Image: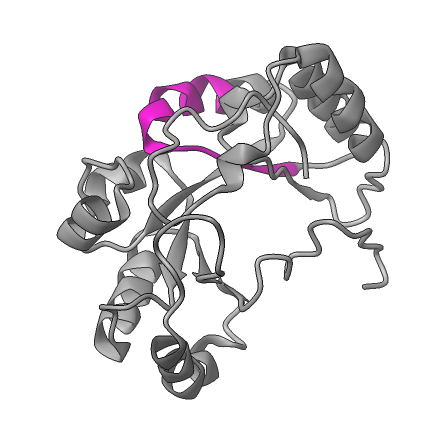
Amino acid sequence: MLRGSGCQWRRCRFCDYHLDFSQDKTANFVLNQTTLTQITGCYGKLEVINSGSFIDLDEQTMALIEEICLAKPINEVHFECHWQHRDAIAPLKERFGRHHIAVKVKIGVETFDPIFRESYLDKGIDGTVEEIAQYFDEICLLQGLAGQTVGSMLSDIAIGLQYFERVCINIMQRNQKPIKPDAKVIEQFQQHILPIYQDDWRVDILMENTAFGVGGVVTCDD
């Protein structure tokens, strides 16, 4: 988990991750360097997570990521990006591509229902699924919200698998923002959706937001 200058959208009504930021690029790099030097490269892949988009990371951090990918070696690196920064994806892929390192970029689309996504969640995505797929390789979905049904959640997952390489399902966690998890919807997810996709290699399911091991040390034996 790295730290950057912070998400530039900051309007999502369900997310307070943007509170984890600093405008001090030097301090950010010192912190990020400590984390990045723990990378072993044993899987040949790297997932870069920060509370925002990859463009929010300082250049020293990006250069170190590039250096570590070459040294380990790591041949595939995953970043996150908001829709508003989609034009920065091609240059990023070109940068790493010069070293024959594949870049996969994930977007938090949350749902493919544009009315629910923009009127309720205020996500800031004005593209169709086809347009989103032109830029992004992977998506995050947010489930466990009031107003969602088994049918709507299954539909979002199906669309995600049709257009993108991987789908990450995040179950809503309580935080400081006004939108809260709905226990009944989460129960429906666990009963009707989890059994279908829990063993699907293209689907990651995070019942807790730390399920990827964020905040801990993951070894090659894990």
| Chief secondary structure of the magenta portion | helix
Q: Please check the rendered image and state whether residue 211 is part of the magenta-colored stretch, yes or no.
A: no
> Residue shown at 53%/21% (left/top)?
56
Q: Residue at x 45, y 76 (%)?
A: 197
Depth check, front residue: 148 or 48: 148
Asked if residue 186 is positioned above or below residue 29 in the image, the reply reads below
Place of residue 18 in the rendered image (x, y in percent of width and height, measured from the top left): 50, 34
Q: Quadrant of residue 73?
A: top right
Residue 71 location, x and y as percent? Answer: 83, 27
Task: Report the residue at 36% width, 28% height from top.
Answer: 9
Is 101 positioned to the left or the right of 130 in the image?
A: right
- Position of residue 102 measured from the top left corner of the image (x, y, whole percent): 57, 34
Asked whether residue 91 is drawn in magenta, I would say yes
* Span shown in magenta: 76-93
Image location (x, y in percent) of residue 48? 63, 37
* Residue 72 in view of the camera: no
